[in-house]
Image (spheres, rainbow, N blue to C red):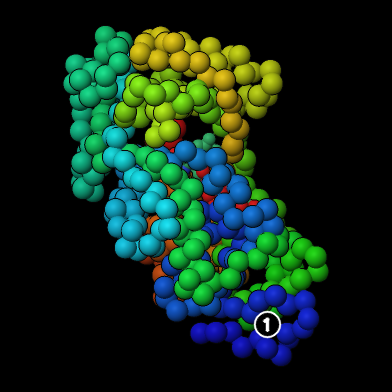
Amino acid sequence: MLADMSSSLNDTTVATVDVAVVGAGITGLSVAWHLTQRGLSVAAFDGRGIGSGATAIQPGGVRQQWGTEVACKMAREAFSFYGEIGERLQPAVDPGMTACGYLFVAQGEAELAAQRERLELQHRLGIPSREVTAAEAGALVEGLDAGNIVGGVWCDQDGYFDRPLAVVGAFHEAAVRAGASFHDLGVEKISRDGDGWLLDLRRGAKARAQTVVVATAWDTPTLLSPLGIELPIEKEPKYLFYSDPIRERLLEPLVIAPEKHFAAKQLADGSVLASDLGAGNANRPGENREIWHSNVRRAITELLPILEYVSFPVLVEGFYDVTPDRQPVLGPLEGHDGLFVAAGLNGRGLMMAPTIGRVIADGIVNGKMDDWIAPLHAARFADGQLTPELQVV
Ligand SMILES: Cc1cc2nc3c(=O)[nH]c(=O)nc-3n(C[C@H](O)[C@H](O)[C@H](O)COP(=O)(O)OP(=O)(O)OC[C@H]3O[C@@H](n4cnc5c(N)ncnc54)[C@H](O)[C@@H]3O)c2cc1C
């Protein structure tokens, strides 16, 4: 399948491959690796460096508790891949997946009812989540004030990578071992080149490929709109508060309180991570830091008093690439043969990466995407066929 484009080679052409992957975050890396496993030649391009986007910020959470069939299936497949990451990718550094469990607490009956409804779907798809009473939640999470909740849902398979960047390194190194090339060059323009594609890169370099996968998160609309492709993927700020590392283990599972827009977890290095998940909408970190901080404090006092004396001196900013239905955009772009997109991860790129890489690679090789991934097709926005995922935190 190697594209025969040697006639158009010149001095500035840095690669001529079957597939060019634009963006080397966790999404592009997984796509690149999966393509190499199908025998295709692959070159990836990222002007800011491997894993330098949102991938550098994410703290490593992996969960299967989602609210739509497509998200649950993606998470379940990725979870199973990550269970075999040692054999699949042979990472140089063990990423250290710890199944600490994710507890979603409900403080009111409406939230509890919504959580219960999602359980039915999850169970049908084999996800071992379950409802817990307030007392059970209190027993699962030492330090939780069970008097301030009415119940919740729990999945003990959900967890955290202790070293999330080792997952990034593992995909990158495995792709390189399998023959993929990585280029520290941003892509400025994508255009038609016969029946393939030409990539104009920074510093006047060029690359040619039969197929292009655009995995550039919130930068995706900028790259695709000159081709007449408009995708509603936007950049949404998110903020995480970190404590200094603490020797005592205070909080093992991840606790999420959707009504408070609050989540907290003690990481492997001992630091406690806490976030006011509604904070991003304000987008003025300097001015709003105190407000978010006091929201986090209020949630801690009410739900996790064990963290009352933990201070959070570090505020880290990152960005979600969000879509109107909070679902990724995956697959071919109609009317642009050989052009694919894998973006709009809406805060779950690490935990979904193995599935995204697999479905895109299969879509390219088979000329057809898996049927069940249809709700994520780019055309859904124009068609108004949205499947909103509400379980985004
Ligand atoms: C605060 C926070 C917490 C998170 N927590 C989690 C979590 O616990 N678990 C989880 O699964 N996910 C989490 N996420 C989400 C996760 O980080 C992202 O979904 C994931 O990193 C997206 O990966 P990506 O490769 O699609 O995008 P990115 O990592 O953003 O990579 C896109 C890449 O494209 C490159 N690029 C852009 N334009 C061009 C161009 N023109 N040419 C070449 N390259 C280009 C960029 O340089 C960048 O490296 C979190 C995100 C944030 C912000």
Residue at the image point whose x is 65% and y is 27% from the top = 283
Residue 332: percent from left, percent from top: 52, 65
Q: Nearer the viewer, residue 372 or 59?
A: 59
Helix or strand or loop: what does disc 1 sit on? loop
Residue 236: percent from left, percent from top: 60, 36
Q: Nearer the viewer, residue 376 or 263?
A: 263
Residue 380: percent from left, percent from top: 50, 53
What amino acid is found at the position of numbered circle 1 in the picture? Gly
Is residue 42 shown above or below 122? below
Residue at the image point whose x is 73% and y is 77% from the top = 13
**In this figure, which residue is indicated by the disc labeled 1?**
194
Name the residue at the right extreme: 204
Name the residue at the front extreme: 247
Residue 125 appears left or right of 386: left
Residue 29: percent from left, percent from top: 51, 60
Residue at the image point whose x is 81% and y is 69% from the top = 204
Residue at the image point whose x is 32% and y is 28% from the top = 252
Is residue 72 shown above or below 153? below
